[in-house]
Image (tube, rainbow, N blue to C red):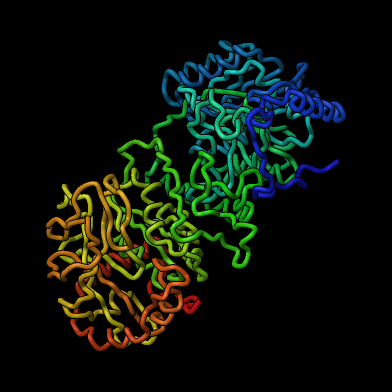
Amino acid sequence: MIDPHQIIHIPHVLYHWRQVPGSTAISADQKDYAILAARAAIGGHLERLRLPLTSVEGHAPGNSALAVPHELDTSVSIIIPTRNGVDLLDDCLASIARHNPENIEVLVVDNDSDEEESLHYLAGVAEKYATLNVQVIAAPGSFNFSAINNLAAASAKGEILCFLNNDTEVMASAWLDRARGLLAMGEIGAVGARLIYPDHSIQHFGLVTGMYEHGVAGGVHLFENSHGYGYFSKHRMIGEFTAVTAACLFVRREDFESVGGFEPQLAVAYNDVDLCLKLRALGRRVLCDPSIQLVHKESKSRGHDVSPEKVARLDREALWMVERWGDRLVEDPYYSPNLSIRRPDFALAYPPRQPWPWDSHNGKPSVASGAIIRAPRFVSPGRKGDQGYLAICAILKNEAINILEWIAYHRAIGVEKFYLYDNNSTDHVKKLLGKLILQGIVDLIPWSINPGQVEAYDDFADRHRHGWTWAAFIDLDEFINPFGHESLVEWLEGFADASAIAIQWFNFGPNGNDVPPSGLLIEGYTTRLCDDHVMHGHVKTIVRMADYDRAQGPHSFHVRGKVVDEYGEEIDQSTNYALMQPKQHHAICINHYYTRSRQEWQSKIDRGLADHGPNSQTVRNPAWIEIYEREAIVADDRITKFAEATRRVLSDFNLPVGPQYSELHK
């Protein structure tokens, strides 16, 4: 017999099925003989393995489901951590009592309840629910989900452990029989449930590794209608996942003890993912069963807890998972590499994460210029109050050398987050940014499209317009310099009626540097071209994201409203305003460190232009650096007023000051 771990998925379209009028191939329910044959094949397989399961009609057309034909009497210990909140706990226990509980015990683990009502309730709960064999176990001390559940598991008598949140209610009468039947298969190590919100949208049906900003794991099917079919009816069928949530998780006690239980280092996050990965390392499989259904009263609109302490804890626990499991988190074997790891709705990854099989010359997918299809917008259920104020979107290629200072500087003047589209970098930028990525300050998005700058800007807007009030669209050699204010945020407060603001450059020269100077870049380059130099007519734009329409180019945008300059004077956006008459700047400019050192200039020439295709005839003139050396004679160190604040940001994140060398000429 083939081991399930020997089965792999080929992530490419290998077969097309032509549909013609009258064909039985048009609908899944048109071939009854095929459906019945499939059901019989599954049933025969279960019989040969002598499993207490049968194959029956499924919840979606053409699919089969598994039924437990007779009750098993395997003992189950249900472990429910709690602290105060007796209304939730009582609803949970009442729902268990309503659904035929036999041969079970319930261990209520009290983590320092201190409300009089709660203490009174816990003292009498065993008598109130006598059929549940309730015991109350004290688990004093700071909250640690792993330690609390491990403590209770050590006292449990059941052959099966069920870890259950106190804010859940059981909806399926056969939920325990389902778990008993599935865990009767020795290869099954854990069984999870389908959890729904009170409004019948899905809160959980399986976890996928590598998802979202920390790259550890996250849920799919989120907020889908539980009465609908969703993505290929997957949430209606029993399925295998890498992990399931411990809000309702069944596991054999023997297996739980074999892997050492929950990891105490993971006090709040990812402990269920770690447990499932350990079970899989034993050769066990992890299932999620839609017939084990519960209501989970976790608030759908609560958003993320962004208190500094909890953010720091989440970052620590995510880092612990990355260090422990490494590459096992990168590609989930039960999730197509053609799908996005940043969205819960099975959207196609954009740009693609998977190279096309016919384009293997460079290992990257190829997208023809002008053939970009904008990714569908996914609007999160976040509240308006969750909106950030100021972000930066940029495209980069092999610009690791100054990226830490560039981020720290802009953090110092008020930027909250950076969305960086990586255009095939070969330097060490991902490693440098690892700490900032884990903390959610940076999103590093693979972006193989060339040219791809305008497409990156539009992609950012499609995905994040509802998350930010303002976003600046600049390059890694550009530093927004609000020299007349204490921060960029303070300066933006004067533009309540603007939809976009165009800010002009000041271009700085190499200052005689053949190699990158030590220390801060903003202190190492302090001479620029004269005020009225033609190059100073170029602009970059900060856009109010609610009014974003589309990018005209790297410099200019179409918006639903007014584009203004730094003085509030309206600009005609029907023309490409990328280059205007240079103006005097009294409060703000963009310091454009175009050439920097001769070594960096050569690297910039080698990597090409992000807004031009690989066969473009437009190139940088190698002689420009000498022109800049000769003509950049105006002293300007106004940006250094933010130098100490930049150093503090670097220090706060334990990041180095100065250039971070890599392979500059790649």
- Is 67 situated left or right of 2 in this image? left
x and y, in percent, of residue 293 in the image = 59, 23
Residue ID at (26%, 63%): 540
Q: Is residue 627 above or below residue 255?
A: below
Rendered image quadrant of residue 194: top right
x and y, in percent, of residue 518 in the image = 37, 80
x and y, in percent, of residue 452 in the image = 43, 61
Q: Nearer the viewer, residue 207 or 495?
A: 495
- Is 12 situated left or right of 220 in this image? right
Q: Is residue 299 above or below residue 102?
A: below
Q: Nearer the viewer, residue 129 or 5?
A: 5
Q: How many marks overall?
A: 0
Q: Is residue 131 above or below residue 564?
A: above
x and y, in percent, of residue 545 in the image = 29, 48
Q: Is residue 525 above or below residue 646?
A: below
Rendered image quadrant of residue 3: top right
Rendered image quadrant of residue 289: top right
Residue ID at (59%, 30%): 235
Q: Nearer the viewer, residue 425 or 355?
A: 355
- Is 7 situated left or right of 389 in this image? right
Query: Could one spot residue 154 in this view of the protein?
Result: no
Residue ID at (53%, 54%): 352
Q: Quadrant of the N terminus?
A: top right
Query: Could one spot residue 546 in this view of the protein?
Result: yes
- Is 569 situated left or right of 615 in this image? left
Q: Nearer the viewer, residue 235 or 156?
A: 235
